[in-house]
Amino acid sequence: MSLVISEPSSLGPPGPETTIAILLGASEYPRWPQWSNPVLGLSANAFRDYLHAGSGLALTPGQILNLFDADGDPSAQLLQIADFLKAAARTARDLILYYVGHGSFYEDQYHLGIRYTRKSQEFITSLESRKLAHVIKDGLGRMRVYVILDSCYSASAVSDWQGPEINAIVRRMSQPLPRCGTAFLAAASKDDVTRAPRSESHTLFTGALLKVLTDGIITAQPKLSMYDLYEEMRIILYHRETDDEGRPELHVPNQREGDVSRLPIFPNTAYRRAEADRARAEAIACAEDAEQVGDAGKATTDGSNSPRRNHHRGFAIIALVFLSAALLAWMLSIGFSFA
């Protein structure tokens, strides 16, 4: 295998300008009606909305390939993915792959159900996980990939994303900001099923994922990593799990340059709210200080309309207006929602 050296500009932290996303799966299976479930569609749409939202990743439509509930057969969808990756290869550093639907096996190979999937013929009408991984690795090359699979037995697909064998020497030489690698967040182990109750708005796994993404985590960090999501989701799902329900798993099948699951990529909305609260408190404190200065000035003058009193009052008003405008500009710059 030849050694590929990335350009220096390719080494950088995850950001919305260099991130792309692919959505896969289905909520309707015309050739397998028992698999159809509207909750799957609600889950996919909610995650798509998060990718678009200013308070989320703020990706443009051109940065997202949405094949959820697409009519194409497996080959057609794989070709669309390959074309999308080829077009984005010059600018993209990070790929988020999200799938929600049904997982199944054929001769030990893991398959992902799509709208085209047909009962008893899923081995030729579903996306083969191994082929999907190959298309993405071939299309992205040395990039960072974040796989999120919301399906039964989803951890079975981890081996399809396996990178080169890692030894202790490579681990010690791992870069603090790896240029490539794969983080894999699975809804269940290779032996467990997942749940998508029709009475819910989302699947249990995606519901927990969205809660962490939209509520954030009270930390000192402005962004969350895949590992942060996993740890918080475990806490949320702990109170809902039963013996016949899968537990989420986090795997890092490719760590040649380091653990990409630890890289901050998802905006932490709790951090944003805390920053806004701090800025608001500072503005109020500054205004109160200015008012106290004005009161002190009043004690040294005769009458409330003296020039010195008016001077301090004007100072207080100007300070409050200035700080309020600065706070508003900062909140708008980070996409803070006033809803």
Image (tube, rainbow, N blue to C red):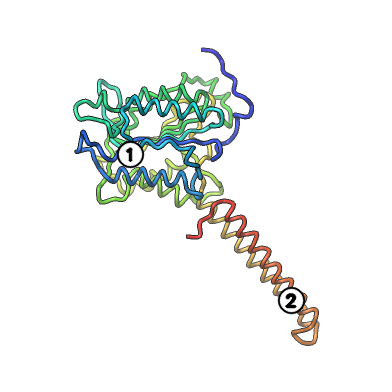
Q: Quadrant of residue 64?
A: top left
Residue in the picture at 47% in, 31% down: 145
Residue in the picture at 47% in, 28% down: 85
Label 1 residue SS: loop
Residue type, mark 1 in image:
Arg
Q: Residues within 10 Å of mark 2 (few under 14, many from 20)?
A: many
Residue in the picture at 74% in, 85% down: 304
Residue type, mark 2 in image:
Gly
Front-most of 5 and 163?
5
Front-most of 184 and 317?
317
Q: Nearer the viewer, mark 2 or mark 1?
A: 2
Q: Quadrant of residue 116?
A: top left
Front-most of 159 and 236?
159
Q: Which residue is mark 2?
A: 294
Residue 247 is labelled as 1
Q: Residues within 10 Å of mark 1 (few under 14, many from 20)?
A: many
Residue in the picture at 42% in, 23% down: 135
Label 2 residue SS: helix
